[in-house]
Image (cartoon, grey):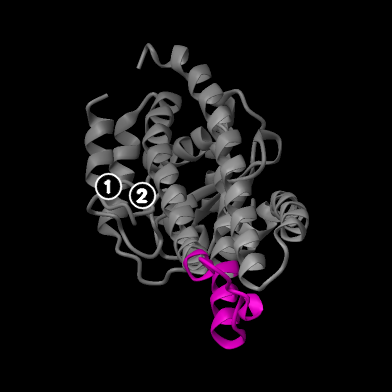
């Protein structure tokens, strides 16, 4: 715990670098699938390239501009009510953790759900949002709630929120484009019958890419999410100086099987635990690392 301050700046620098690399990767992937669709539909490569790249960049810009509002809408969240005693406690804990992190106090939202959960979103610390479920507010004691808020504050401190928030939209766009392309090809054909020598192989390659692109982009996104959850657990324990608080909260989260998930599955990786299915085993398809492993790591600190 004492060596943690020397690692925080390294984490931030690494996350900023990773964020840039991931965003560029997503731009390339989005452009590539647009190019593959254009080629399959028979458009000249130069035209497809000239149109595809601006569309990809424009979509990333739009996703960046409206990503926070989209996440809040997808989660069906609302601003916390300071007149409510429980929600006022949540606001106090957020303020306390922002002071510990040396960051501006995020806006506080509440998602009306019996599930014990929370997430952070935003572009940067100045416009960050922390949202907790009503179940978390009611079922966690102050020590456990502080541990959860410390975890979410760490996502903000380490600049995780931008890449995770923007990538939600890009992964969704890639999946939607792939579905549109497959439907268009099934019902409208492709390349206008101009296959030429070797054209059939190129069409097959393009189709395989269109099918695999959304899978690959989602796997990349999920891998990023799992790795950053471990970092946020450790950094949250540093902020609270109490790893046991978050460990106990995770135990309650593990036992609290979701019975009324709210919002959209597209934002599930943003939460401290999947609101639709608890990750009890390690899997490449998991949005989060196994809860037992997270608890074990916290208690070994």
Q: Nearer the viewer, residue 245 or 180?
A: 180
For numbered disc 2, what is the local secondary structure? loop
Residue at horizontal 33 percent and vertical 63 percent from the top? 277
The image quarter containing residue 37 is bottom right
Instruction: Find the magenta span and give its range.
Output: 177-202
| x then y, percent, for residue 56 | 70, 54
Q: Residues within 10 Å of mark 2 (few under 14, many from 20)?
A: many
Residue at the extreme bottom of the image, as rendered: 187
The image quarter containing residue 163 is top right
Residue receiving disc 2:
288
Query: Would you say residue 180 sits in the magenta stretch?
Result: yes
Task: Locate the C terminus by quadrant.
Answer: top left
Residue receiving disc 1:
291
Determine whether label 1 and label 2 are within 8 Å by CB.
yes
| x then y, percent, for residue 194 | 63, 76
Q: Nearer the viewer, residue 205 or 228?
A: 205
Q: Is residue 91 above or below residue 8?
A: below
């Amino acid at each position: 715990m004492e060596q943690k301050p020397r690692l925080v700046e390294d984490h931030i620098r690494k996350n900023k670098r990773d964020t840039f690399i991931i965003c560029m990767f997503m731009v390339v992937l989005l452009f590539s699938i647009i190019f593959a669709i254009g080629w399959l539909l028979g458009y000249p490569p130069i035209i497809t390239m000239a149109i595809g790249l601006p569309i990809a960049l424009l979509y990333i810009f739009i996703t960046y501009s409206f990503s926070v509002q989209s996440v809040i809408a997808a989660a069906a969240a609302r601003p916390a009510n300071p007149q409510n005693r429980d929600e006022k406690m949540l606001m106090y804990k957020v303020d306390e953790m922002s002071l510990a992190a040396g960051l501006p106090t995020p806006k506080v939202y509440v998602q009306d759900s019996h599930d014990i959960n929370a997430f952070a979103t935003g572009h940067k610390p100045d416009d960050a949002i922390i949202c907790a479920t009503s179940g978390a507010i009611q079922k966690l004691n102050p020590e456990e709630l502080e541990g959860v808020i410390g975890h979410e504050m760490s996502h903000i401190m380490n600049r995780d929120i931008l890449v995770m928030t923007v990538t939600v939209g890009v992964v969704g766009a890639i999946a939607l484009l792939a579905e549109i392309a497959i439907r268009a090809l099934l019902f409208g054909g492709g390349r206008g019958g101009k296959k030429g020598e070797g054209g059939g192989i190129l069409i097959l390659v393009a189709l395989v890419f269109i099918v695999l692109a959304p899978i690959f982009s989602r796997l990349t996104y999920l891998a990023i999410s799992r790795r950053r959850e471990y970092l946020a657990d450790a950094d949250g324990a540093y902020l609270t100086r109490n790893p046991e608080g978050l460990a106990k909260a995770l135990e309650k989260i593990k036992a609290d099987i979701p019975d009324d998930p709210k919002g959209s599955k597209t934002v599930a990786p943003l939460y401290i635990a999947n609101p639709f299915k608890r990750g009890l085993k390690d899997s490449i398809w998991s949005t989060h690392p196994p809860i037992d492993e997270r608890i074990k790591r916290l208690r070994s600190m």
